[in-house]
């Protein structure tokens, strides 16, 4: 099943059924919003699945699907938590900050609590108040959850996964070191994230979802040039059930929680050939490229994103068809009342 | 105006009007839930205020108000962000962890992103998986916001404050040092918070709200004994507008965002006389008492909360009447599938 949220009605949008080929869409009859389905999955989950199947198998139904008319599948959510399960990314980004990766990171997942009060839509501009903040994208895979009880084991966690989405976890790199040094984690350095136009159920992913990891290249482009194609199923130290169990260790997770796996990153056998045009898998964020440039050349070369730059994040199936639709955003400078609060 | 959420209907409860004396309540006709009012404050804010005034001035209306039948005013929210504006607390709690307070903390607010997917109700048990986690309460004041634009200045931030609530920001003290050392802030160490039964509009607070700080003693009791009565308007380094502007520096804040001022704490002139029974103002959390005990005696004496312990947090007006109703919770041991995920 593939679902989206049309920017229509209230802040939570209007739930859409989307055809497997992303060509057609139709307003769902089962429930007005995705959160409404998640709030009552036992009853509405089977109903929306049946409604979607009837829609999918009748090619005459629906109107043309337009990702640009959509909000993120959950336009806002009650929780956005993001793990950091690709240790190559953790290691490189920390090296760029002059920080080492403790060995415990191989056994104990790293996770932060993100803001979820208003996400950017898949084709929305990324508002940037100051280029000096160092705007970066982060390409990720995330799961949308049903209720998870406190202290859930991995089997319970796995069974609570309802949908998959792609994420652009927008980061302000130059604000991160000082903010993390304060000890309370990210706040100003992690503004609103954007999600793929379509959320996809596990059964629709076939063998690409092995119950722990989602396999497939995450295609990340900057200004139309492929910047990275790391495989989301490779080098992911902790699978999603483990990340969910970590999040639920001391508290229940409410239905509609979105949990990310962190910036996708594969191990680079040869740092000098990590770039896509050198035959490498490249990067799902700019910071990784800059860190390797610093290691190789003493200073970063790839700039962070500036006003007018475009970022595209997508995943294709074995036949080359887009699974989630594309996150396709432009950076837009915005004037604000106050930059220094 | 005073509002609450009856545990009725869906996950967001049923919006109640509550009389000033907290004796009576009535289901609101303006909107079914508090979030619905916040989502459309320009239209529904004046309507709910008018409805409340008509209810308040007719003592024959309504049914007896029962805080135990209520969820938190927002049973779940799209954002819970918590500042830490009382530097005495920051300094003491950091001292307990062997960490110093950087001087920049006097100019740059400390804030963390909390989980908001499901709050405890004002009289709900606090579920505790393991007493070794070091369960503590934290008595706080928080504001509930309308939309705040990115980069808002303090005047815009102040004008976005719609309601006030009290908070028990439940903390697992023994999990904090290792979690913060990982660098990504709190996650497992901050399980679900609880809020006062009633949310109160700024106009209802009179002179106690000076536009920056809410003045009044926050009465915190443990097992029926007064543990602290610090004044929320004293020693708060940053007022709420400043904290809101800090939160909104790089991103807009969505309507219904709850923003806390941090554990209320007043400067102790004489550490040995900080306790209430010594004539001091005492503490709005156990950690502060334990830190001072460690300074005075070399080791903490006051235990963290155990199964069966009760915590009560309340604020009274000049005439001794409860403003928000009381947070009144019991700690309950819960068995979970998995403690070590």
Image (spheres, coloured by chain):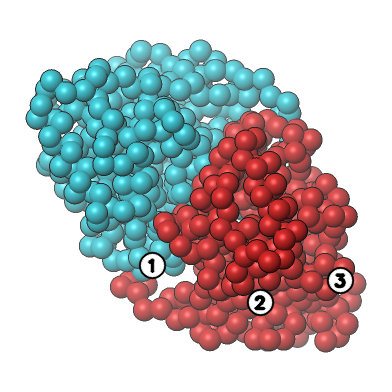
Chain colours: A red, B cyan
Instruction: Estimate how packed mark 1 is, as few (under 14), some (14 to 19) or many (20 or more) residues with alpha carbons within 10 Å.
Output: many
Extreme residue in the left direction: B57
> Mark 2 or mark 3, which is nearer the start of the sequence?
2
Q: Which residue is mark 2?
A: A312
Q: Which residue is mark 1?
A: B150
Figure check: A127 above or below B95: below
Q: Label 1 vs label 2: CA separation?
A: 24 Å
Q: Closest to the observer: B228 or B118?
A: B118
Residue B151 x/y as whole percent: 36, 68
Whether residue A69 sits left or right of residue B274 in the image: it is right
Residue A228 x/y as whole percent: 76, 76
Q: Label 1 vs label 3: CA separation?
A: 42 Å
Q: Nearer the viewer, mark 1 or mark 2?
A: 2
* Residue in the picture at 43% in, 17% down: B310
Q: Nearer the viewer, mark 3 or mark 2?
A: 3
* Residue in the picture at 88% in, 55% down: A207
Q: Which residue is mark 3?
A: A319
Figure check: B53 above or below B273: below
Q: Nearer the viewer, mark 1 or mark 3?
A: 3
Whether residue B280 can be seen here: no
């Amino acid at each position: 099943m593939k679902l989206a949220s049309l920017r229509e009605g209230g802040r939570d949008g209007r739930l859409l059924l989307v055809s497997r080929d992303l060509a057609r869409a139709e307003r769902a009859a089962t429930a007005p919003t995705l959160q409404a389905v998640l709030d009552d999955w036992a009853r509405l989950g089977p109903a929306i699945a049946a409604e979607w199947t009837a829609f999918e198998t009748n090619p005459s139904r629906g109107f043309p699907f337009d990702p640009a008319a959509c909000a993120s599948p959950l336009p806002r959510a009650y929780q956005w938590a993001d793990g950091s399960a690709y240790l190559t990314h953790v290691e490189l980004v920390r090296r760029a900050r002059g920080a080492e990766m403790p060995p415990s990171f191989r056994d104990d997942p790293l996770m932060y609590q993100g803001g979820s009060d208003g996400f950017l839509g898949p084709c929305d501009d990324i508002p940037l108040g100051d280029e000096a903040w160092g705007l970066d994208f982060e390409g990720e895979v995330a799961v949308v959850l049903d209720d998870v009880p406190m202290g859930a084991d991995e089997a319970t966690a796995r069974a609570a996964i309802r949908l998959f989405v792609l994420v652009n976890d927008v980061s302000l790199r130059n604000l991160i070191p000082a903010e993390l040094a304060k000890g309370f984690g990210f706040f100003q350095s992690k503004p609103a994230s954007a999600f793929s136009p379509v959320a996809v159920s596990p059964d629709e992913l076939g063998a690409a979802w092995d119950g722990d990891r989602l396999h497939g290249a995450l295609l990340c482009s900057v200004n139309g040039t492929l910047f990275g194609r790391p495989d989301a199923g490779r080098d992911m130290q902790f699978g999603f059930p483990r990340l969910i169990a970590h999040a639920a260790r001391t508290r229940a997770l409410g239905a509609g929680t979105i949990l990310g796996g962190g910036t996708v990153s594969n191990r680079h056998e040869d740092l000098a050939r990590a770039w896509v045009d050198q035959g490498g898998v490249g990067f799902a964020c700019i910071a990784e490229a800059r860190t390797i440039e610093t290691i190789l050349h003493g200073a970063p070369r790839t700039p962070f994103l500036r006003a007018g730059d475009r970022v595209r994040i997508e995943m294709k199936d074995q036949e080359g068809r887009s699974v989630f639709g594309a996150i396709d955003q432009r950076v837009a400078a915005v004037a604000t009342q106050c930059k220094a609060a």
